[in-house]
Image (tube, helix red, strand yellow):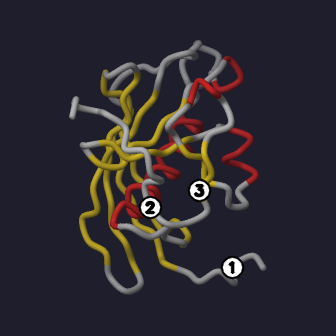
C-alpha cells in the first residue's frame, strides 16, 4: 500500500457520511449538529495507512487582515480534529472541550490543503487527552493539544 493511501471504509463508527464534494472523494463529513463548524468548514476525516487524518481547504472568508488563515479558524479545525483523533480507536467520541492549547508554528493560506494528525495521550472514563499537528500543504502550521470531557447524547437535546 502506498503511504497515505485512503482506506475505503469510514474511519470509525458514528455520524459520518461520504463527502458530497467530488474534490473530497474518499473523505467523510461528520453529520452531527455543529452549525459553527459547518459555517467555518467544511471539515473532513478519513483513515489511511497512517491512521486518522482530518482535512480542510480554507477559502478567503477564513483569512485575517494579513491574508493568513485566521487563528480562530485554525483553532476550530484543531478542535474538530481533536475529537476525530480521539475517535480513531473505533467509535465516535462525544464530549465537550475542557482545555485547548495551540502554538501557531507556520503560515496557512486560502487554497492550501490543511491536514491534521495526532494521537490520544490518555483516554479515561470521563476525560480524554489528545494532541496533534496541522500542516498546510505538508508544512507545519499549528501544534495543538486538548482535553475533552465525555458526555452522553442528551447534551443540547
Q: Say left or right for 76 vs 4.
A: right
Residue under label 2, please give it. 12
Residue under label 1, please give it. 155
Task: Report the disc number at residue 141.
Answer: none
**Residue at x 54% of width, y 18% of height:** 68
Position in image of residue 62 (x %, y %)? 65, 26
- Quick check: 129 above or below 154? above
**Residue at x 60% of width, y 45% of height:** 18
Q: Measure how far apart labels 1 and 2 are at the Cα level.
A: 21 Å
Dividing the image into 4 quarters, which one contains the C terminus?
bottom right
User: Tag 1's secondary structure?
Assistant: loop
- Quarter assignment of residue 3: top left
Closer to the camera: disc 3 or disc 1?
Answer: 3
Residue under label 3, please give it. 16
Upstream in the sequence, badge 3 or badge 1?
Answer: 3
Q: Measure how far apart labels 2 and 3 are at the Cα level.
A: 8 Å
User: Tag 2's secondary structure?
Assistant: loop
Asked if the residues shown at circle 3 and circle 1 are in contact, with their CB atoms under 8 angstroms apart, the answer is no
Q: Neighbour class for label 1 at 10 Å: few (<14), some, many (≥20)? A: few
Position in image of residue 153 (x %, y %)? 65, 80
**Residue at x 75% of width, y 76% of height:** 156
- Quick check: 75 above or below 110? below
Dividing the image into 4 quarters, which one contains the N terminus?
top left
Amino acid at each position: 500500500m502506498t503511504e497515505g493511501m485512503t482506506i475505503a471504509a469510514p474511519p470509525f463508527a458514528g455520524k459520518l457520511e461520504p463527502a458530497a464534494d467530488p474534490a473530497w472523494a474518499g473523505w467523510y463529513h461528520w453529520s452531527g449538529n455543529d452549525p459553527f463548524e459547518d459555517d467555518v468548514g467544511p471539515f473532513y476525516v478519513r483513515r489511511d495507512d497512517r491512521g486518522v487524518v482530518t482535512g480542510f481547504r480554507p477559502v478567503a472568508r477564513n483569512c485575517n487582515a494579513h491574508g493568513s488563515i485566521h487563528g480562530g479558524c485554525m483553532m476550530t479545525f484543531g478542535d474538530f480534529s481533536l475529537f476525530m483523533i480521539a475517535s480513531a480507536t473505533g467509535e465516535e467520541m462525544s464530549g465537550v472541550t475542557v482545555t485547548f492549547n495551540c502554538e501557531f508554528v507556520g503560515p496557512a493560506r486560502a487554497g492550501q490543503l490543511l491536514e491534521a494528525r495526532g494521537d490520544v495521550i490518555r483516554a479515561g472514563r470521563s476525560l480524554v487527552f489528545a494532541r496533534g499537528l496541522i500542516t498546510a500543504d505538508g508544512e507545519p502550521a499549528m501544534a495543538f493539544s486538548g482535553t475533552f470531557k465525555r458526555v452522553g447524547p442528551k447534551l443540547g437535546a
